[in-house]
């Protein structure tokens, strides 16, 4: 089954990330890269996202007219920092992957809709 793992962090730790010593940041990245290497057999694709300050949001107002604003959803207290598409046997395997994530923050697990099944 295919799942997307969304790597999520709150806005405050994201700001603090820039202030921690470079060697600690590098060690965290080393553990994250190792995690991806260790689980490479189930990783289909994925990427780290640029910061929330690079986001543009399109909302639809009255009469479905698009409204474009800079930044992520203003109401959000958390931001998605990256994602991975994985193919594993079942939800329990996806959950085990998420539980082993060394990057800190939360990992949201979402199954992919398979329109070809049935």
Image: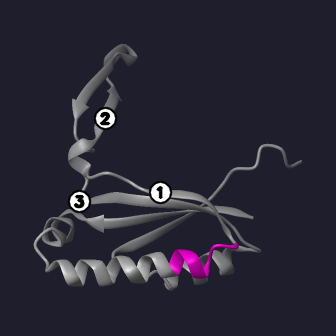
Q: Relative to 19, say whether 82 is above or below.
A: above
At x 46%, y 75%, the residue is: 33
Q: Nearer the viewer, residue 108 or 38?
A: 38
**Residue at 70% over, 73% down:** 41
Labelled pair 2, 1 in contact (Cβ < 8 Å): no
x and y percentages locating residue 85 in the rendered image: 60, 60
- Determine if the magenta segment contains residue 40: yes
Q: Which mark is residue 47?
A: 1
- Judged from the image, the secondary structure of the residue bearing numbered disc 2 is strand
**Which residue is nearer to you in this view: 20 or 106?**
20
Q: Is residue 32 above or below residue 57?
A: below
Magenta region: which residues? Answer: 35-41
> Neighbour class for label 1 at 10 Å: few (<14), some, many (≥20)?
few
The residue pinned by badge 2 equals 57
Do residues under tags 3 and 1 come within 8 Å of each other at their CB atoms?
A: no
> Residue 11: within the magenta?
no
Q: Nearer the viewer, mark 2 or mark 1?
A: 1
Which residue is depicted at the point 28% across and 41% down? 55
Q: Position of residue 88 (x, y in %)?
A: 72, 72
| x and y percentages locating residue 79 in the rendered image | 30, 57
- Quadrant location of residue 86? bottom right
**Marker count (numbered):** 3
Spatial distance from mark 2 to mark 1, Cα to Cα? 19 Å
Q: Dot 3 lies on which element?
A: loop
Find residue 113 and report its horizontal and vertical position in percent.
69, 50
Residue 57, quarter of picture: top left
Q: Nearer the viewer, mark 3 or mark 1?
A: 1
Q: CA distance from mark 2 to mark 3?
A: 15 Å
Measured Cα–Cα span from mark 3 to mark 1? 21 Å
The residue depicted at 66 percent of the width and 54 percent of the height is: 112
């Amino acid at each position: 089954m295919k799942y997307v793992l969304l790597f999520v962090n709150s806005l405050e730790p994201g700001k603090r990330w820039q202030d921690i010593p470079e060697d600690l940041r590098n060690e965290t990245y080393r553990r994250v890269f190792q995690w991806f290497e260790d689980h490479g057999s189930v990783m289909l694709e994925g990427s780290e996202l640029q910061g929330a300050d690079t986001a543009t949001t399109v909302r639809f107002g009255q009469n479905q007219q698009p409204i474009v604003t800079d930044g992520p959803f203003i109401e959000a207290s958390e931001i998605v920092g990256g994602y991975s598409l994985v193919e594993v046997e079942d939800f329990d395997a996806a959950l085990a992957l998420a539980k082993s994530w060394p990057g800190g923050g939360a990992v949201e697990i979402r199954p992919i809709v398979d329109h070809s099944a049935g």
